[in-house]
Amino acid sequence: MLAILGAMEEEVALLRGEMQVTQESVHAGINVIRGDFKGTPIALAQCGIGKVNATICTQMLVDLYQPEGMIFSGVAGGLLPNMQVGDIVVASHLIQFDIDLTAFGRRHGELPDSDRMIQSDANMVSQTADCFDAVFEGEADAPNLMIGTVVSGDKFIEDSETLRWLQREFGALATEMEGAAVGYTCQLNEVPFIIIRGLSDTANESAPDDFKSNLHTVCKHSFRLMERLIPTAGESLSAAEASAPQQVAASA
Ligand code: ADE
């Protein structure tokens, strides 16, 4: 089974609309919808905004549903000058940009005993790129796909100075508020994950207005990619699970 997350209602609504729902439940105040999405069993949750909400939701999904993999789909602010609203960024790596232990000589985003880069599942990244090609190739006005580092922090970025800092300090393509938290939690639980972000704005002074006017259209783009990716990723993760050696319970 795949777990699918979004932070906001708009980021999960189109997926929910295509599901055959079998069960709805609420855990830690989060609504989880189980059912089939085009033949693939999924658990869909709207986690809420920010890294704390994303962490609680991810851990809850792992504990209660034991997903074979997790996909987060949502929007982000683009950090490179030539990016267009609607372009899609897939995170190969994520960093929590607001972790700051520089007082102890560490780099921004770095915690003791762990790399500041949280790595997405490489198979899921390449499957997402293949699905993107299959969905958008040859289409006039198709969005661009970019794969690289995404940064996450508990702040909506709306100024050119901060966006430049995020780009230069972390080599990041996009900024958002949940991905690194989902990724970190998945990494600790050894659950393969991918974070996919449609660009709603370019994190500059017009970002709040751009975000509001573009949210719905950008979610439609991402939905087209997700429609293709969910069955592909679901099938490949269940095949991997079926062929994995069974864990033998340790005897006392
Ligand atoms: N999500 C979408 N746009 C964003 C921005 N500019 N900053 C943080 N999160 C975002």
Image: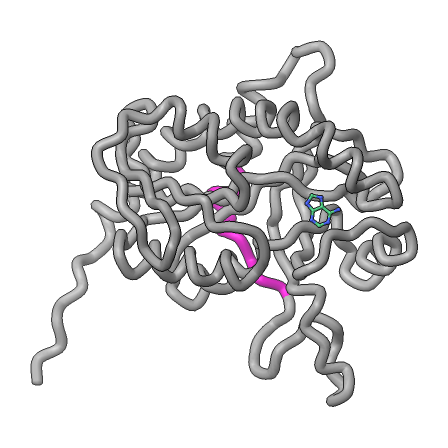
Position in image of residue 217 (x %, y %): 65, 23
Q: Which residue appears at 88% of the width and 39% of the height?
A: 81
Where residue 168 appears, x then y in whole percent?
85, 59
Q: Is residue 238 above or below residue 149?
A: above
* Residue at the extreme left: 252
Left or right of residue 91: residue 17: left
Taking depth in this image into account, of 90 and 41 the one nearest to the observer is: 41
The boundaries of the magenta stretch are 117-126
Q: Quadrant of the N terminus?
A: top left
Q: Is residue 75 above or below residue 99?
A: above
- Near-viewer residue (205 or 88): 205
| Residue 197 x/y as whole percent | 62, 40
Q: Let me know if residue 140 is in the magenta part.
A: no
Above or below residue 111? Residue 167 is above
25 and 40: which one is in front?
25
Tell me the quadrant of the picture where the C terminus can be found: bottom left
147 displayed left or right of 158:
left
State the image coordinates of residue 115 (x, y, percent, origin top left): 61, 72
Residue plotted at (73% across, 36% down)? 211
- Residue nearest the viewer, comparing 159 with 208: 208
* Total numbered badges shown on the rendered structure: 0
Name the residue at 37% across, 40% down: 44
Q: Is residue 180 left or right of residue 202?
A: left
Of all residues, the one furthest to the bottom in this rendering is: 104
Is 142 placed above or below 214 here?
above
